[in-house]
Amino acid sequence: MKSRLPILAAIFGLFFSGLVASRYVGRIPHRGYRQSTGVFQLPHKRTVSLQGKSVLRRLYREGHYQRALQLAKEFLRHDGENPGMWVLRAVFHAAIDESEEAMDALYQAVHCGFDEPQQLLQAPEFFELRSDPRFPLLLREAAASIGDRSERGNSAAAGIVEGQSALVTERNTTWDDRAHVLVTTFAEDPQGRRFFPFRKSQLQDPVITLVNQWISEGTAAGFRGILYDNRDRGHSTLQRTDFPQLAFVEYGPMARASGVDFGAHPELCFNLPTFGNASTAQVGDVFWCSNPRKLMGDQVSRAQVLNNWRRDQLYCFPSHQDFCVPHGDVFPFNLPCWVVSEGSSGSDQPFLRAIALCAASFRPEVREFLETRQLLWQTVQWLMRRSWTFVESPADYLSGRAHAVVFRGHELDQERMVRMAHDLTTDRVPAQIILRVAQEDLPLAAETAELAALPETVLTGATAIGRIHRTRRLTRRMVVDVGNSGDFNGRTLTFEWRLLQGDAERVQIRTLNNEGSRAELLIDWHDPFQVPWNTDLQTARVDIGVFADNGESLSFPGLISTWFPPTGRRVYSDGKLISVDYLSPAAEGMYADPVLEPVRMWRDIYRYEDGVLMGWDRFGGDGQVDRFNADGRQADPGGEAKIVTYQRITLPSGLASLQYSAVDQQQPSGPLKPGKQDSL
């Protein structure tokens, strides 16, 4: 009997805690916190909140708990159904010992879809809440929500593709909070689209004749199950009459009112494989840019683009002024997840046609194989790059021209492309490259503060890596591993690494194992140089490609780009930086993206003694001279050296400026509790 007492006590304790917690849940004023909102407004709301979270985390680390709490409340008035923001609010309440309010905020987070109980259990911020009898039930509710949030996010009724129309509405569009995108869902109408794939008048075209024959024979999949999405409101669109079997995305009134139907909007994607285009660009101000470069400059957009690529979404954009005289090649990174056509409006048309015909040419079992693995458009891109008019050998395919940042429509060989698609079988599908950064140089002690404001690590994905060379080092070192790459038919892989664009004297690629799955990349600073296959243009980007060889074919590449901002003229001697002059750009007329590279109005001259860096002198455009020690602190002849902090400031013109200030010493703004910096 005595041995049963602890068990009975434990059972009673669990029952009592559940009873208390359930009563507590019953009195949470959910209605006062939740707010309904149009689904097409959610991307903006969540992006604002996402940007706000970084500010809140900084305030928290600095000990400004009350200020962080007030800001969190403001963000929740703007976006009251954001579970992550409710968790942050709970953190701030807990930091000022408001346990009741912290529990209330956590229940609101779970109510809004938070489903990561382990995060709550392991967070040191909630250590004192663990003794609350309601906390175990909170964890159980969060655990019960695992999977529910995605189900709730996809609970809208799928739209039916009727004829050639796939209509985007608030009823078939939901928000995926983890991927930070809207997802519009469609289902095929089993009775719909019994059209011939082409009009009779089109059969004079030899490529269309081939594809039509294959579809009629049943050896090609045709256009069913894929979507075409035009986002320039018909400015440069495929014609419905040319593709009678193809479903065209249309936008309902609420979607049009939100603007997602015009321009590059990676915050909206589809459940079906989708290709599309937006023959638009930003013009008329200091931030002029093509759609791809605009997306490269924003952290959220970059993540959405890579996410959508994994979801089998492919878009074509014109390069506009980003790849032409007099500006040169001004793209900071080379991403494989879209097609950028050389030129302006309409230059995307040959690519749209080629993509559509290629997708239709796959054998039904191959299309199913690719779609199941969300590799349809990657395989289409692979075939396009293998079938360029100038690609006649594996060496041509491994060249930088075949994987350039911008493509030319007249170099497409559409007949070759569709024949290769139709000949492809499931046992000949190429391997898939998966990139992973294994090692990378950390900032030097003297540049830690500056690189905190202007990081070098911009993009890290499975198919693309992007870095900006901002370190004072001559050479950036990175070790990239592709050992997680795989072949769908279980074949052994070897790997080919190629310098696609850059000075071979300034780039070293050292493979670190026999199969070549791991390589050390040593990339020296590059001043602007000529584009190898278009010598009229200059570029400031080095591209490296890695390809998997399964014995049958070379894969689609993984791309690693390093951008060297041409806003500062650098001088090195014997591997040491002598000066950086931001008052004199590295190349006259060479443009640098103002979003990624802010204005700096100074020139640094470095001081050495016996080859050892002693510091540098900074000459401002206004004649002011500041002296810095080797550790990056500002020298003060009358006292101790001062710590320097850097901050991006928006100028009246809208451009960003990097500015710095010196303080006697860093003083914490409040008492930091143990573990806080690690958890958040």
Image (spheres, rainbow, N blue to C red):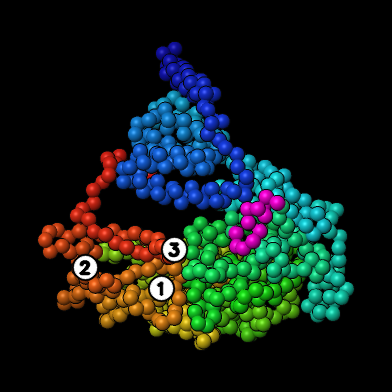
Q: Position of residue 314 (x, y in %)?
A: 64, 64
Residue 296 lies, with reference to residue 384, above or below; the image says above
Which picture quadrant has residue 244? bottom right
Question: Badge 3, how many Cα within 10 Å: few under 14, some, many 20+?
Answer: few
Give SS at disc 1. Answer: loop
Q: Secondary structure at mark 3?
A: loop
Residue 637, how many percent across, how many down? 12, 64
Q: Residue at x 22, y 55 (%)?
A: 663
In this picture, is 512 found above or below 104?
A: below
Disc 2 from disc 3: Cα separation: 27 Å
Q: Position of residue 646 (x, y in %)?
A: 31, 60
Query: Which residue is at the far right?
Result: 200
Mark 2 / mark 1, whichever is N-terminal: 1
Looking at the image, tell me whether mark 1 or mark 3 is earlier in sequence order.
1
Q: Is residue 188 left or right of residue 121?
A: right
Can you identify the residue that label 2 sits on?
626
User: In the rendering, at what x and y percent does residue 458 appear?
Assistant: 44, 63
User: Disc 1 marks which residue?
Assistant: 565
Where, by quadrant of the figure, is residue 275 drawn?
bottom right
Q: CA–CA distance between discs 1 and 3? A: 19 Å
**Can residue 534 be seen in the rendering of this structure?**
yes
State which mark lies toward you, 2 or 3.
3
Does the magenta portion include 669? no
The residue wearing badge 3 is 654
Q: Amino acid at mark 3?
A: Gly
In this rendering, does residue 143 appear at all? no
Q: Bounds of the magenta span?
A: 253-265
Specify whether residue 264 is painted magenta: yes
Depth check, front residue: 612 or 585: 585
